[in-house]
Image: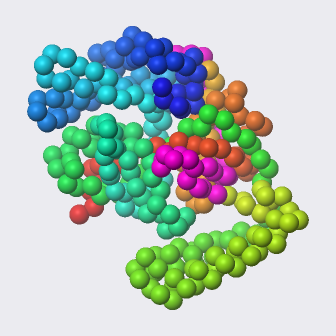
């Protein structure tokens, strides 16, 4: 069973049997067929999407095996968004065991490779040179989380905000130079990290952790598309899963200069979300890639 069905408002689908019954009865219908792609050896892939809320629903991929038989290859909750989160180069790689793909973005703003689950895999599979052209630009990120906590913001002056902007711009240029082999930039980044570690070690003795760490985006667990975040809430909305009646918070979040939309069940969010406050959560990151814009 997919771990983040609850985050999309499908908490009643709590066993594999319930999930597959729901997929076969509600999702895999002719009116929900959204895309198809031909595979090798006469096989094909059909994708079905059942919308349950604004831009949120459940997706199922069915493999036609070419001998009159078929099987469900994958299913997952999806969250579509129209906002472009990153214009950096995105590399596409296929998962080993199923017809799904991961996207990898080298984000200079956060200094790490951002890995996410691609929620429009059939669009990539339909490309005539899929598997050979794997780099694209234009990624729209979104995320689900099953539980989250709202925490208060850190009070900052105008001077603090301006200093943070300058520091981020300088760090981005240093990271880019370091990736290009600039030894001076590498030494500067190393010295900066050591200074930051020393400052944090001193502050953490007398201050609360969440007053020292304003935002964070760190890989979490053994799956590469899950992250532990502390991010700032930029907009708040709510919607209803029309299949189950469960209410969801839809939050626009910015985390280390990366922006995305986050869905969390209303009943499982501790605190009242508001613009300017922060959210602490473990998220499953997904996104759709603009496959019409390959990087040649």
Compare residues 267 and 2 and report the one nearer the observer: 2
Q: Is 233 within the magenta? A: yes
Q: Position of residue 207 (x, y in %)?
A: 86, 62
The residue shown at (64%, 71%) is 165
**Image quadrant occupied by the C terminus:** bottom left
Vertical relation: 269 (above or below) 107: above
The residue shown at (23%, 19%) is 70
Compare residues 217 and 80 and report the one nearer the observer: 217
Rendering colour mode: rainbow
Compare residues 239 and 98 and report the one nearer the observer: 98
Task: Write the start and end of the magenta stretch as one range.
Answer: 216-245
Vertical relation: 41 (above or below) 10: below
Q: Position of residue 162 (x, y in %)?
A: 69, 73
The residue shown at (57%, 75%) is 171
Give the overall secondary structure of the magenta segment: strand
Tally of marks: 0
Q: Position of residue 131 (x, y in %)?
A: 22, 50
Looking at the image, residue 43 sits to the left or right of residue 248; the answer is left
Compare residues 226 and 55 and report the one nearer the observer: 226
Q: Position of residue 222 (x, y in %)?
A: 51, 47
Residue sticking out furthest to the right? 206
Q: Is residue 17 visible?
A: yes
The residue shown at (46%, 60%) is 113
Vertical relation: 85 (above or below) 64: below
Q: Is residue 54 visible?
A: no
Residue sticking out furthest to the bottom? 184
């Amino acid at each position: 069973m997919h771990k983040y069905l609850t985050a999309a408002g499908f908490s009643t689908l709590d066993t594999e049997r319930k999930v597959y019954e729901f997929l076969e009865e509600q999702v895999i219908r002719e009116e929900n067929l959204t895309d198809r792609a031909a595979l090798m050896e006469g096989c094909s892939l059909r994708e079905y999407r059942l919308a349950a809320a604004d831009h949120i629903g459940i997706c199922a991929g069915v493999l036609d095996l070419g001998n009159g038989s078929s099987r469900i290859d994958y299913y997952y909750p999806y969250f579509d968004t129209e906002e472009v989160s990153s214009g950096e180069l995105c590399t596409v790689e296929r998962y080993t065991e199923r017809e799904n793909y991961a996207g990898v973005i080298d984000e200079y703003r956060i200094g790490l490779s951002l890995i996410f689950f691609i929620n429009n895999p059939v669009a990539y599979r339909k490309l005539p040179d899929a598997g050979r052209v794997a780099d694209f630009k234009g990624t729209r990120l979104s995320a689900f989380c099953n539980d989250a906590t709202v925490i208060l913001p850190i009070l900052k002056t105008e001077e603090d905000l301006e200093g943070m902007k300058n520091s981020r711009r300088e760090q981005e240029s240093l990271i880019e130079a370091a990736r290009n082999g600039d030894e001076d930039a590498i030494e500067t980044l190393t010295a900066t990290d050591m200074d930051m570690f020393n400052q944090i070690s001193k502050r953490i003795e007398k201050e609360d952790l969440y007053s020292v760490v304003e935002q964070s985006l760190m890989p979490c667990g053994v799956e590469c598309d899950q992250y532990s975040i502390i991010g700032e809430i930029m907009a708040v909305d709510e919607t209803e899963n029309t299949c189950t009646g469960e209410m969801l918070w839809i939050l626009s979040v910015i985390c280390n200069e990366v922006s995305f939309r986050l869905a969390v069940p209303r009943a499982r969010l501790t605190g009242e979300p508001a613009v300017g406050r922060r959210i602490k959560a473990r998220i499953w990151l997904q996104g759709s890639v603009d496959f019409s814009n390959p990087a040649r």
